[in-house]
Image: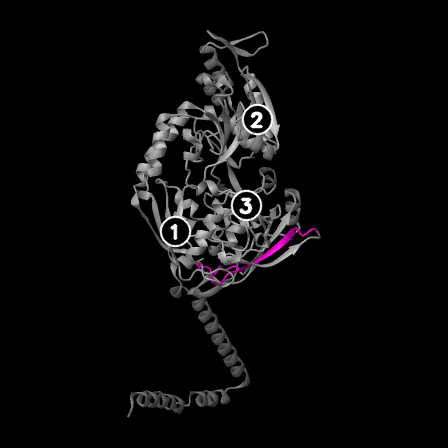
Amino acid sequence: MKPNSKIASFFNALFVDFRHLNIIAKIEKVVDRMNPSEKIFFFLVSLVCVVSGLVLLIRVHNSFLVAVPSFGGSFTEGVVGSPRFINPVLAISDTDKDLVTLVYSGLLKVGDDGFVEDLASSYEIKEGGTVYDFVIKDSAYFHDGKKVTADDVIFTVAKILDPVIKSPKRANWEGVRVEKISDQAVRFTLEKPYAPFLEALTVGILPKHIWEKASSEEFPFSEFNIDPIGSGPYKIKKIGKNGGGIPTIITLSSFHNYALGRPKIESIVFKFFQNENDLHLAYEDRSVDSMAGLSPTVARSFGDNKNLLKNAALPRVFGVFLNQNLAPVFLNKEVREALNIAAPKQQIVDEVLYGFGRVLNGPTPLDKETDSEIVQGNAEKAKSILLENGWKENENGLLEKKTKTGTTLLSFSITTSDAPELKKTAQILEEAWEKLGAQIDVKIFEPGDLSQNIIRGRKYDALLFGEMVGAESDLYPFWHSSQRIDPGLNISLYTNITVDKMLEEIQRNVGTSSTESMDKKDVVVSEIKNDIPVIFLFSPNLLYVAADEVKNVLLKDVSSQNEIFLSINKWFIETDKVWKIFVPKNQLE
């Protein structure tokens, strides 16, 4: 007899034997002999036993169940401003960048602990940090089903470097040579080692087969700037426009072939508003579920609302950058020291940011000020420093200092943009420094005018401004002496031989221990603090109101608003119940 036949015979015999026990028939005979009251009692007890047994089984079953993310759900994100360039080569506004982060993907992306592969399956850094070899995943596809290849990467870099297109990312790619190794492999060669180059490799990759027919002149006007095809976690599903053809709503759907796996949330709807007040009203009437880029004024109205995520620090450094070339008064170190001590930094954080920020004492957001005297501002001590160094009050109550070459008056202008927060900050500083005996003139400019006509030509005494130092806090563009002239970002025109040397060595330290680079960065920060080329003020927090139904919104320190969505593949709305033993630890809710 075959083994299967033996098994079948065993279970058949078992079933027959069990049936021959006639348990049900015996129970029926016992019940028939019962009187009516005994039967009622018997059936009640039996019902209780059956129900109790079922409840117990359900509880035992549920005790082994856990909630895990499942596919489904949607939420509506409200943002200020309409998209213009949903294109990684051209994106400038926060609205554009938000959508680019979701629609496009790069070779790398920012992860929880540094950079992780996105479209790339692997990469290798060689030749002392001047050669980067990348292999593209075979599973990397664009939204239209075409594979991502080395040709697409090379095409994207060429567009970034095209002087006609004027990409804001061009500076990150100057001097970089790109070559094809194979259809799925590409090599980047730098003129010299540059450790932060990995950040440039997070740029979204354009599909060459879509864009190659557009000339450089036509590039900014292509329809694909609004209706793009990328390889990111979400693809464009539907676009709604007003009578003028301006997008008012864009619906995204999750891309099942995304290189890092299909996101759990099925769709995201973006609604665009002209100003923050309209956005806030839309949130109040529930026509949007979440919103980013809030001002401290609006965020304050949320109070202790659990949906307001407010503890993620933006790597932005705001301060007063002192131009010693144009305002010789700042050549006196005691002046810079006194202005720093007299600045009421905590008052600015409290009254301008409503507490959504931190007081700084250095060039990175990590340099939190701990000296309570400097945090609060001490006008008396600041003035005593000036008086001890030969400054005296004149008949107008202003401080001046007589030298061999003449008399220097403690007088300068503060230049800033017409952003409400910066105007209020300038007013607080003006009042504090005038008590010191300084003569202050505040000059306000529209942001575009400030950038093009004032900052680029370094035409200011003191510039109240914010610098975005990036996730890695790369200080080279902001503090190396070679970056004093536009398009360099050394807007205090700072020069220090030791700082230059350390920054150059950090750039060359590709592949060396992070401890060595951190030690050199500490030297840079220490030198800058000692020289006081800037009155560092504050670093703001990112303010984001998350949707009620969205879970696992993880916000660590981010570089900009759009980085909220870097972890979108970890967000979810819907859940399933499964036995815990079948669930990987990283998927447990």
Q: In the drawing, what numbered circle is on residue 179?
A: 1
Tag in front: 1 or 3: 1
Q: How many numbered circles are shown? A: 3
Q: Mark 2 — residue? A: 415
Of the residues shown, which amino acid type is indicated by label 1? Answer: Glu
Work out whether 124 lies above or below 507.
Answer: below
Tell me the amino acid under the disc marked 3: Tyr
Query: What is the chief secondary structure element of the magenta stretch?
Result: loop
Relative vertical location of residue 428 with respect to residue 264 in this rendering, above or below: above
Q: In the rendered structure, which disc, 3 or 2, sits on the residue that comes first in sequence?
A: 2
N-term-proximal mark, 1 vs 3 = 1
Viewer-nearest of discs 3 and 2? 2
Q: Which residue: 41% across, 25% down?
A: 495
Image quadrant holding the C terminus, namely: bottom left
Residue 544 numbered tag? 3
Residue 281 coordinates in the image, percent (x, y) = 66, 46
- Quarter-wise, where is residue 516 in the image? top left
User: Could you classify mark 2 by the number of other residues whose Cα lies within 10 Å: few (under 14), some (14-19), or many (20 or more)?
Assistant: many
Magenta segment: 244-265
Left or right of 18, for residue 228: right
Q: Residue at x 56, y 33 (%)?
A: 451
- Residue at 39% x, 30% y is 525
Residue 296 visible, this orientation = yes
Q: 10 Å neighbourhood of mark 3: few (<14), some, or many (≥20)?
A: many
Sequence-earlier tag: 1 or 2? 1
Residue at (34, 36) in percent of width and height: 506
